[in-house]
Image (spheres, rainbow, N blue to C red):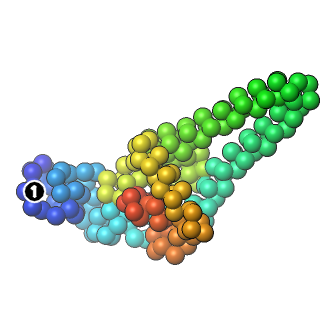
Amino acid sequence: MSDMSGSQPPGWYYAQGDPPGTQRYWDGSQWTGAPQPVGGAADAGFGGMAATGQFATAGDRFMAFLIDYGIVLAAYVAILIVTAIFGAISDTLGTLIGLLAWLAVVAYSIYNWIYLQGTTGQTFGKKYRGIKLVEEATQQPVGPLMAFVRGLLQAVFLIPCYLDHWWILIDKRNQRLSDNVLKYVVVKA
């Protein structure tokens, strides 16, 4: 592949050495992602995702959200019940069991939302619904660190009336406000 000059703005271009009739994304300093057919995803103007039918629907995203948070909610309810049972036997035992179970739920949440979503683009809910989180330009998973940063940004945007969740309903690509800021998209897997 040929190297483009540093003055070439980011965008979709033919990369020498790629198959004819394809384009690859140039981020301003290097080629990223796989070649895309000309007239296909690269020309859709959405970082390699075709404008029709490729972005996750608001319904798919909502169902994935319900699955992911439903698992955590069910675990917390189970913790309350088990802690109450063991607490009736001994306050110390109930506290210890409750603390260990709570730590297990926190560890599961970190694994699901940061590690899995960062490395594969999918939480358990997203995997079940057939959608994934990727960088808009490269179409690759965002990585655990940026999945964590995304979570922090979502928390900031949730403060004013759950704005981040409602944004999905008004965005033409069904993306959260935080995803638009970070240049991420949730797409069909």
Q: Amino acid at mark 1?
A: Gly
Instruction: Identify the residue at image location x=56%, y=51%.
Output: 126
Q: Position of residue 17 (x, y in %)?
A: 13, 50
**Looking at the image, which is closer to me, 101 or 2?**
101
**Looking at the image, which is closer to me, 35 or 183?**
183
Furthest residue in direction right, as rendered: 88
Residue 96 falls left or right of residue 131: right
Instruction: Identify the residue at image location x=32%, y=62%.
Output: 47
**Looking at the image, which is closer to me, 78 or 52?**
78
Q: Position of residue 146 (x, y in %)?
A: 41, 47
Instruction: Identify the residue at image location x=82%, y=33%.
Output: 83
Quarter of the image holding residue 61?
bottom right
Q: Position of residue 187 (x, y in %)?
A: 46, 59
Residue 161 falls left or right of residue 43: right
Residue designated by label 1: 6
Q: Residues within 10 Å of mark 1 (few under 14, many from 20)?
A: few
Above-or-below relation of 66 to 87: below
Quarter of the image holding residue 42?
bottom left
Element type at mark 1: loop
**Looking at the image, which is closer to me, 102 or 9?**
102
Instruction: Identify the residue at image location x=16%, y=64%.
Output: 9
Q: How many marks?
A: 1
Q: Is residue 130 visible?
A: no
Q: Is residue 79 visible?
A: yes
